[in-house]
Image: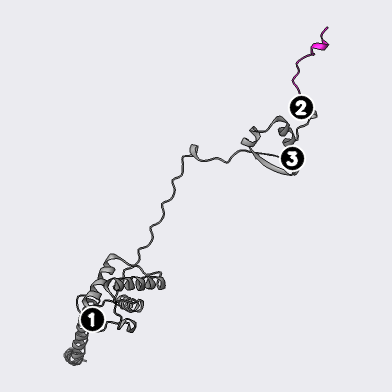
Amino acid sequence: MRERDRIEVRQHREQLDAQESAEREARERPIREAEGKLKETATELAKLYRARLLGEAKDPDRFIDPATQGMKLTEAEADQYNIVEARKYREQNPDFYLTDALFDSIRAYLAKNEIRLVSAPMLTALLQRYAEAGLLPERPAPEPEPEPDEPPIDQQPTAPQTFKGIDPSTGLEREYTAREVDRMSSDEYRRVFRIYAADLVLPNIGPGPRAQR
């Protein structure tokens, strides 16, 4: 094949590639535009959802416990009811981690939606939505306990000194502390450690007075 023919073939292939690329771009452009709009819409919806849960806007999807409907309570009675229900929720969810920021968000949500009575099921539903929206705080990891400082070698405790002897009451071998040994009478000492007269060796002090003439 002549060089001229090779050039024409290459140019023709380049034209076909450019045409296919343009056609593909034309086909995919509406899809990309639609995906972009969907992402923008999802982002806006997520912002709106979070704003509602944070008490920045009214929540049309708020859950009201039917059990609270028709209850006529004074302000003090309503406060006591809410305290009891909050404790009930904490008992049912011992791992629940409450921070000041979360408490303020819940109060803002209830105030924005004019919710006066809050039952344990209402807290369960609301905090489940908080979890789905990533609004629940994570419990911090416990700090490692500091390792105790080891005393210097010359200050390290030593094992108490003990002595093996016999328990006179049982006849069995047992250990005695140095304090117990120090408090023994000579008779107790001999019985505990079985020291008999035959075992005693007196120092050589020479003949006694009766031996002198």
Amino acid tagged 3: Pro
* First reached walking from the N terminus: tag 1 or tag 2: 1
Determine whether label 1 and label 2 are within 8 Å by CB: no
Relative vertical location of residue 173 with respect to residue 110 in this rendering, above or below: above
Upstream in sequence: badge 1 or badge 3: 1
Quick check: is 78 in the magenta stretch? no
Who is closer to the viewer here, 99 or 8? Answer: 99
* Residue bearing mark 2: 200
Q: Residue at x 72, y 43 (%)?
A: 173
Describe residue 29's horizontal placement relative to residue 158 as left or right. left
- Does the image show residue 160? yes
Q: Which residues are magenta?
A: 200-213
Name the residue type under label 1.
Asp
Between marks 1 and 2 in the image, the one whose residue lies nearer the viewer: 1
User: In the displayed structure, does residue 156 sit left or right of residue 134?
Assistant: right
Cα–Cα span, label 1 and label 2: 100 Å
**Residue 69 located left or right of residue 151:** left
Q: CA distance from mark 3 to mark 2?
A: 20 Å
Q: Which residue is mark 1?
A: 59
Q: Which mark is residue 168?
A: 3
How many C-alpha atoms fall within 10 Å of the one at disc 1: few (<14), some, or many (≥20)?
some
Q: Secondary structure at mark 2?
A: loop
